[in-house]
Amino acid sequence: MNSKPPSKQDQLSESIKLSLDAAEAAMDITTEFSEVQAKFKVAADKTDKIYRLSMIGVFGSVIVSFVALLIVAGLFWRTTADLNVVTQSNLKLLKVFTEKITEFQKSNQFEKLTSQADVINESMETISGKMETALEAVDTVASELSSIKNQLNETQESLKAANGKMTEMTLAKIESLKAGQKKVEKALKSIAKINRKSVNSTSRINSQVRRITKKLKEFNIEFKREVAKMKKLQKTNVDENSNQIKFSR
């Protein structure tokens, strides 16, 4: 069965309907496109922000890494320089120490110190002997002084006795001048003899005193000489000890 051909009005209605559908579809597409465009713009803005933040982070990381690298390089350079200085100083000190040890061994300081100690010990023994000799000399001087004192006492007693005897004899002779002239002469001779003994005793005492004084002077000179020698040895020892201390420092 054949259908009726559509009229113009139907065709026009159909065209309008299609146009409306197409317009509605276009509006829907436009709306969706606007929404998609807005979402895309938001996504693009977020992506741009993320990109900027990422670039800032990358640049910051690069700068921090560069600064850290510079700091590490500076510390390494400084540590290396200090290490080189310390190494050079240690090498110089080791060289100086080796030279000093060599010089010290060459100069035989230990032997010199030992010999000086032996010399000091010998000097001390010599001084001890001198002191013993001095003590013996002092004892001798004391005994000689005691002997001199006894001799002086004896001389004084002799003089007193002689004076008393002379007085008695003089009085006796005055009373009997004419009868005892010979006795007076004899008494005068006795007095002269006693006086000569006194003079001889005084001379002997003076010679003993001079001898003792001479011994004391010789002992004093020898003692001063030994003391000066000891001071010189001590000064030499102190100088060498101070040099050793400076060297050890």
Image: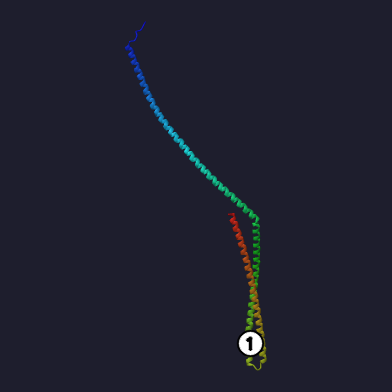
Instruction: Using the image, determine if residue 9 lies above or below residue 224.
Output: above
Q: x, y percentage for residue 18?
A: 35, 16
In the rendered image, residue 192, in percent from the top left (x then y), is placed at 66, 86
- Tell me the quadrant of the picture where the C terminus can be found: bottom right
Name the one closer to the observer, 195 or 176: 195
Q: Give the x, y percent position of residue 39.
A: 39, 27
**180, 87: nearer the viewer:** 87
For the residue pair 146 and 231, the one nearer the viewer reads as 231
- Could you tell me which quadrant the N terminus lies in? top left
**Amino acid type at image mark 1:** Met
Q: Quadrant of residue 17?
A: top left
157 up-or-down from 177: above or below:
above
Q: Give residue 9's position: percent from left, percent from top.
A: 32, 12
The quadrant holding residue 139 is: bottom right
Residue at the outermost front position? 8
Nearer to the camera, 5 or 183: 5
Name the residue beneath numbered marker 1. Answer: 166
Q: How many marks?
A: 1
Q: Residue at x 65, y 80 (%)?
A: 203
Residue 51 is left or right of residue 134, and the answer is left
Disc 1 crowd, CA 10 A, few/some/many (<14, 14-19, 20+): some
Name the colour scheme. Answer: rainbow
- Vertical placement of 247 versus 4: above or below? below
In the displayed orientation, state which residue is furthest to the top: 1
- Looking at the image, the residue that sits furthest to the bottom is 178
**Residue 31 image-quadrant placement:** top left
Please tell me whether mark 1 sits on a helix, a strand or a loop: helix
